[in-house]
Amino acid sequence: MTEEARAFGYLTQPEIRFLDAAVERLIPADELGPGAKEAGVTYFIDQQLASVWGSHGRNYRAGPWPEGTPQQGFQSRLTPREIYRAAIREVNVHCLKRFQKVFEYLAPREQDEVLEGLESGAIELPSLSSKLFFALLLRNAMEGYFADPIYGGNRDKAGWRLIGFPGVPASNYNDLIGEHNVPYRVEPVSILDIQQGKVKLDSQGLPKHVKLKDEERNAR
Amino acid sequence: MSATRLKPVDAVVVGTGIVGSILSKELADAGLKVVALERGRMIDPQHDFASPSTYDELKYDRHSDIFQDLSRETITFRNNARETALPMREMGSFKPGEAVGGTSLHWGTHARRLLPWDFETRSRTVERYGKSRMPAGCTSQDWGLTYDELEPYYDQFEHLYGVGGKAGNLNGEIQPGGNPFEGPRSREFPNPPSPMTYAGTMFANACRELGYHPHVNPVAAQTQAYVNPYKLMLGQCIRGGFCSSHACSMGAKANPLTTVMPALLKQANFELRPLSNVVKVNLDSDRKRATGVTYLDASGREFEQPADLAILAAYTFNNVRLMLLSGIGRPYDPDANRGVVGRNYSYQSAGGVTCFFEEKAFNPFMGGGARGTAIDEYNGDNFDHSGLDFFGGAYVAVASGGAMPIRSIRVPPGTPRWGAEWKRAAARYYQRNLTVRLHGACQSYRQNHLDLDPTYRDANGLPLLRMTFDWGDNERSASAWILGKAEEIARAMNPSRMHAQPTAGHYDIVPYQSTHNMGGAVMGADPATSAVNKYLQSWDVSNVFVIGGSAFPQNSANPPTATIGTLACWAADAIKDQYLKRPGALV
């Protein structure tokens, strides 16, 4: 997806900067490959928040709304959109008090400290549970890093390359099941690749996988 | 608003999942005028499930539009009666479907039969271990029918769904390579078993070393192209993953859309009405006979569909809720332990040992559904429970279900949940782990039940179903003890690290476990402890049959789907051969 095609539908510029910094700590760039920021995870989150899911359109939304036990699951009145909007602002207020800077300008070590405080609940936010926000952020970061690139994340299939996931299957796996302990390493194929006509399809409409060269296979 | 009264039909079927499709087909074949009402939308697999759209984990595992739309209807949940039940606001522990074809559009295709022992859980346990083995408040009971009675219908269902596997017991003779603990089958599976994956082979070798009898799971993802008895052609599974929770693009997953509907939809005496949500079964003035059902169409208009016969073939929750909303059968009262509708709700216990290796390549994305390798030594009463503090058991398996990245990345214990260290571990171990999994039974207890919620309502203003459920000590003990055996098998595979997790603590509705919600309108021999008789016929209203997962008196270790389909075949025959000849109570 080209840069100009990535029009943000919900997040504001400060929120984008916050999330770019946060998701990059959750899944950082390193010698193994791009991190969540470069993989477009912030844009993925924006698109999710703008979707039916962002307003919990398929969730039960009627009250009353008592807190409940952990086993009873999500019981917040807030939708994901509202959670991100409130939490980002309130985390930045916390960062200003603690470090005199907003989250994106903190050193990586300080950013990790803030994220750990949200994860454990040690940082208290005025409007919502910090644990709830962190759990949602981590879940969305993982989704954005590993979901098909049609949703705007996992750019250049960075998440799939990291773990060696081939994406849309080829139709020849039945022939390969008996090859035990032989790594199957191919150029991953996404639904986006197929939509954009970038891969050859067989008669069943499935992609023909292209094997990676040995040096690429052995990178991990 | 008054309902528009439609032209009467012979049979109205509520739901078009595994049960509704089979009942509709069998009754239409018998010459009845049949109308099937489905709350979900119509599905045309060529269009809705066209490749590559189904190879989408985010959509199908997380946000699928073939799962129940909880904004309109959900359940409420609490661990026990001291708590206030709260709505299940988002999908988690289980994923009921909402579409023509029902939940089985996204099932994992694991098609085990139950063990003969499972049908006589209570009497055989008491006979072998004495009454004291039954935990306090345990309401597990016999089914009111035996494995031998059901065997021809298991066979029928397996041929309808093209199940692939290897018989372990053919007419009483143990067969090499199959599961020697299974009940006797009258003939071989219609399709061959799946070949074992590398992970499955390692597990099988470890099991053999320890003296167990590993075998390949029977699956209803076709192991070869197959034509079923309704003359419908199913494609071969390519083992491309994206299976459980997902729709299938290859026409290889047996479900109503691949096994029944194309033949049924051609029949002039059958009509399918999707987006039609049944809200009530209507009874006559003495409440002994159903006159038909009331439903709301896509625009919310109310219709009354008169029928001589009403088949409730919805998901467990909806079968029970419709009975409660319609006043069929006495609602269960857990305090008095009286009444039957809502009684004996159960689920599926679990546990697993994830094993991490340093120099392996499992290619875990190759696979699908329940393809895997299992042992049955610790299932049911296949082992001596003397000296143990539980009854029932689990089968132990390594599944090759197709490991998708959002759901299936596992990292060794002690790894942080995020950051550089997590990323390195994810990259290293996605390909190098397997889980030895327990699929365990769940007994029924007095306190675990279903009723109508006093507070929360659905989009039509009707009360939601309320689930009160927690694990019993029996399930926690069984999981912990059998997990110890699974750890021995795991160790024999020589992993560098292991991580064992039993079923423990309180049942939690958040993490996905299985869509195996059972009971609430259970079958049995005694109307005081069952809502339907052995033919799945309401004890109280004889022209209502309530068929599905709702009929299980407790949940066995083996997955329920094949037995649900088998009960459909069994009930269809009882209706055709007995009920239609002499309408009235069959027992």
Image (cartoon, coloured by chain):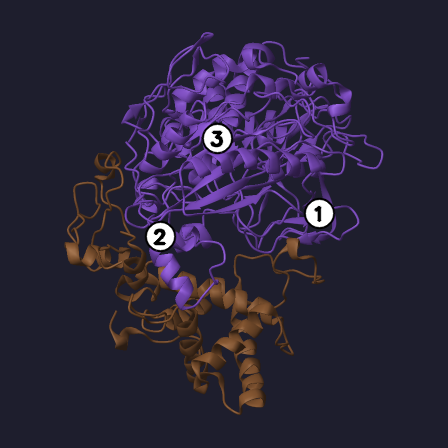
Residue B166 drawn above or below residue B388: above
The residue labelled by disc 1 is B79
Residue at the (43%, 35%) spot, across then down = B492
Q: Judging from the image, what secondary structure is the residue with disc 1 in?
A: loop
How far is the residue under mark 1 from the one under mark 2? 34 Å
Colour of chain A in the image: brown
Please check whether the numbered discs 2 and 3 fall on a single chain: yes
Q: Nearest to the eye among marks 3 and 1: give it.
A: 1
Q: Earlier in the sequence, mark 2 or mark 3?
A: 3
Amino acid type of the residue that numbered disc 2 sits on in the rendered structure:
Asp
The residue labelled by disc 2 is B56
The residue labelled by disc 3 is B18
Q: Please report, as a chain letter, where disc 1 is located.
A: B
Amino acid type of the residue that numbered disc 1 sits on in the rendered structure:
Asn
Q: Earlier in the sequence, mark 1 or mark 2?
A: 2
How many other residues sit within 10 Å of disc 2, few (<14), some (14-19) or many (≥20)? many
Q: Quadrant of residue B468?
A: top right
Residue at the (48%, 41%) spot, across then down = B274
